[in-house]
Image (cartoon, rainbow, N blue to C red):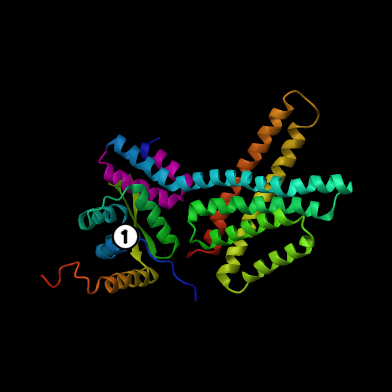
Amino acid sequence: MDKSNIAEWIVARVSDRPRASAIVGDLLEQSGGSLAAFAFAVSRVLVAMTWRWAAGGMAAFASIFATSWFYTHFTIREMLIGSSTHHHREAWMMWATILFFISMCVCTQAAISVFVYGFQDRVTRTSTLFAAALIASNATIWMPHAILVIPLTLLLIASCFLFDTESRRALLVVSFTGMAYATTLMLFRYVAFRLFLSGPRPGYLHRFAVIFLGSLFLAIAVEANVLASARRRLLPAN
Amino acid sequence: MSKSPSLGEFEQLILLAILRLGDQAYGVSIRTELQDCAGRTASPGALYTTLDRMEQKGLLVPRDGEPTPERGGRAKRFYIVSSRGRDQLVRAQQSFHRLLSGLDLLGESNG
């Protein structure tokens, strides 16, 4: 296989085929037949096209631990106090778990979006606003009347996005991307746990850790893909 | 009406280079024009990601040319500035002119 065909195939993994072909053609034209110059130029293009996604993925991974920190320090603590006092699960405890899961979906998305599209981007702003609102809701859901106030506040924030087309579309992008993350995470874990963790066998904890981390990586990768394609389709001129 | 985001310096240079090149603006010629006119050596990574972003924002319109042998049978991707790109460039340049007026940085009064 010719060096330029290999380069074109690699560049097409992070771009589309016609664009990859044009870029490799340009680099061939400028390299003057030098393989080293050509390979160096291709690697620079690849780094420029992918570093933001890689950094966004790492930030998304870190955001899961940040969200978990809030959940552990505010909500879990109250859950333990509540359980020891009342000896039963209260309604807010179930909602806290659901809110934690949703906030994780939106926080990872906000982290990716900040790195890839920047703070000025509409999707970044929307996902960051919802991530902050969900984390705050999660940390305060144990408070009196919070179970009523929080859904109303979140609905009010969401309804503010229904007034103009671009905001509605940004909300749709955030929703699709969050759903993609949640679906991937749940499906992968369900299948992997059934296949690899049925029954107490040696290495259970090791397998559990691999599946747990693997599912997070996979969900972030799917989320990044859905974010890119949903944003391209729904907000093409942003 | 939604507010248009402002253009970055590199984006303005690229738009100006494309306007200067007319219908012959593609990766290599844009890079050469930036080097010759602005003394700016654009890295291939920065150039192609910026062209990509500007295309997505609707500032540029791409057109594929004919395949040529020196490019391994690959077509050139030519760019033209869209009306949206032109409007944003004009707006950015007008702000520069307004800010520059009366400063005599270009030495008009001495020249």
Q: 10 Å neighbourhood of mark 1: few (<14), some, or many (≥20)?
A: many
Using the image as rendered, state which of residue A87 and residue A40 is in the foreground: A87
Residues in magenta, as a range: A5-33
| Residue B11 x %, y % | 35, 60
The N terminus of chain A is located in which quarter? top left
Q: In percent of the image, x 65 and y 59: which residue is there?
A: A133
In the rendered image, the residue lying farthest to the top is: A202
Q: Going by the picture, which residue comes out furthest to the bottom? A: B1
Q: Position of residue A179 (x, y in %)?
A: 67, 54
The total number of labels drawn is 1
Residue A186 lies in what quarter of the image? top right
Look at the picture and state if A204 lies above or below B25.
above
Q: Secondary structure at mark 1?
A: helix
Reply yes or no: does residue A17 show up in magenta: yes
Q: Does any portion of residue A153 appear in the rendered image? A: yes
| Rendered residue at 22%/54% (across/down) | B39
Image coordinates for residue A71, horizontal then vertical, percent:
70, 48
- For this orientation, the residue located farthest to the left is B111
Identify the residue under disc 1.
Answer: B14
Residue A135 occupies quadrant: bottom right
- Which three-letter amino acid code belongs to the residue tagged 1? Ile
Q: Residue at x 77, y 57 (%)?
A: A143
Chain of residue at mark 1: B
**x then y, percent, for residue B5:** 43, 66
Q: Could you say which quadrant of the image residue A159 lies in?
A: bottom right
Tell whether position A103 is magenta: no
